[in-house]
Image (tube, helix red, strand yellow):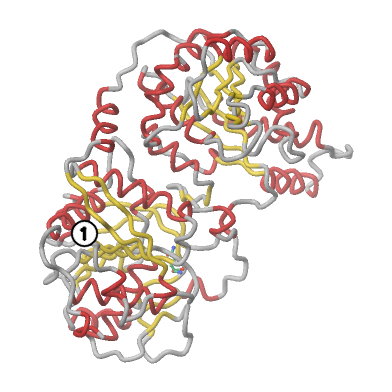
Amino acid sequence: MSTKYIFVTGGVTSSLGKGIICSSLGRLLVARGLRVTIQKLDPYINVDPGTMNPYEHGEVYVTDDGAETDLDLGHYERFLGIKTSQTNNVTTGRIYYDVITKERKGAYLGKTVQVIPHITDEIKSHVLKLGRSNDYDVVLIEVGGTVGDIESLPYIEAMRQLRYDVGRKNTLSIHLTLVPYLAAAGELKTKPTQHSVKTLSESGLSPDILVCRSEYPLDKSIRAKIAQFCNVEIEDVIASLDAETIYEVPLLMQEEGLDTRVIEKLGLPEKNADLKKWIEFVDKVKRPSKRVSIALVGKYVEHHDAYKSIVEALIHGGAMNDAGVQIKWVQSDYLTDSNVAVQLKDVTGILVAPGFGGRGIEGKLAAVKYARTSNIPFFGICLGMQCAVIEYARNCAGMEGANSTEFDENNSFPVIDLMPDQRDVENKGGTMRLGKYECDLVEGTKAQKAYDAERIDERHRHRFEVNNELRQKLIDSGLTVSGINPERNLVEIIEIESHPWFVGVQFHPELRSTVYDPHPLFTEFVKASLQTVGKSVGADIEEIV
Ligand code: GLN
């Protein structure tokens, strides 16, 4: 069977949830036994999102091979249970970078280098790289941006050409659009969809299936109208209503027949979808028997997308414990030793988030101290772990003024410091310690018990590390080092044995948590937090001031 390519474009407005629709369709196809992957084409000129501010772009999702990618790749991995790589994310910046590099090498043999064919050829070669690997039956291609954007045009053109290159019967064009409800008219309106499909069709990529986001159900007459104006069959008008949880979307799409239409049109084998486990998971997310409240302490908390994978991993960990996790978003800029107990009084677990730069650090340290002294389960991720080490150094290991050299280059106890190989790094893009590294776990520790393994690997994205010169001093004062990178002898996990659950990790476990394989550290963190529910936790306010 030849590889099938499904192009998914978006119209009318951004933020319609193209990534979730792609992931949901992907899940439905995987459930029918097909080998599926998804590729995201991003129309911006940055080479990757690694240098972008989290307010601009949300979380940077890191793959095993160390690529800094779009957060939609996280959805692909969580929904499909696959591993993605650099190949799954292409940006305009990367395309131009590659084309210009080739041009400088003389690879175009004196030709004038143009958008068509050189840029479009480069885009196609990236898409075909996945398709030709023989690893997949279906490659879904999510085209970022909205139809009609200047930036998207080369991608749409490349998809149009691809339909001919690989044969029309091997491709499908799905367009995600909006059918808004106009309260004043009391009606759903199809005109924006008509316009969007018209624009797409003018570029030669007429849609085969329309997925229509709407706040209200689409009745038969609306579907018939859309079908007539947009040149599709009525069964190809799929309604996508708002869901209670994103994990319900595959089930809603199945009800609407999206996967059946895709299978029919592409001539894929008609196996039944096995979604039993998925349905059980959604049920647990929607109807948990208990609730737990966890503080997520960070400096980008106004922008929840900056912590996307952490939020999802907490949902997965919650489901494993039959618990709904309510997140209390806590802005670290405003936390101090004197207000932390009040600000965090209702929570039974504290997670200090990853991040860069000195803003909000003292607030994070206040949260760590509060968790440590009040026996509240604590989970520190990357910068959160570094904060735990700084706090421990200052308050338990007699290292007054300890800090990371990221925030104070000349501090008296640089417990967190740059590795020598990071000292001379000048280029900011793609130069951190990125991707998968191994970690040996120490027998009997909380981390080792959670993973139930001796050696694991996890994904990284940071420049700074626990300073090995001060490691022994921390250990002598009672800090446990429970995970070590064997290759370079770097501290990967720390814990406090006498505390109910206090774990900090230098890596990003949230990037590995999926619906079918929730991350054990998140599961254990939620479990520990549940154990504090109903108990009187939290120190006396006076005690910690
Ligand atoms: N700023 C820290 C470092 O570079 C932590 C990074 C992170 O939290 N991802 O080491």
The three-letter amino acid code for the residue at tag 1 is: Leu
Q: Residue 512: image x %, image y %?
A: 35, 46
Q: Which residue is mark 1?
A: 441
Q: Residue at x 28, y 68 (%)?
A: 344
Q: Does residue 206 show up?
A: yes
Q: Toward which corner of the image does residue 230 lie, by quadrant?
A: top right
Q: In this rendering, is residue 176 above or below 60? A: above
Nearest to the observer: residue 197 or residue 141: 197
Q: In screen coordinates, is 68 left or right of 82?
A: right
Find out if the beta carbon at label 1 lies less than 8 Å from the nearest ligand 1 atom: no
Neighbor class of circle 1 (other Cα within 10 Å; few <14, some 14-19, many 20+) is: many
Residue 391 in picture, x, y percent from top left: 30, 80
* Residue 219 versus residue 79 in the image, above or below: above
Decide which of 111, 460 is in the foreground and name it: 460
Locate residue 28, reporting x and y percent: 40, 22
Q: Quadrant location of the C terminus?
A: bottom left
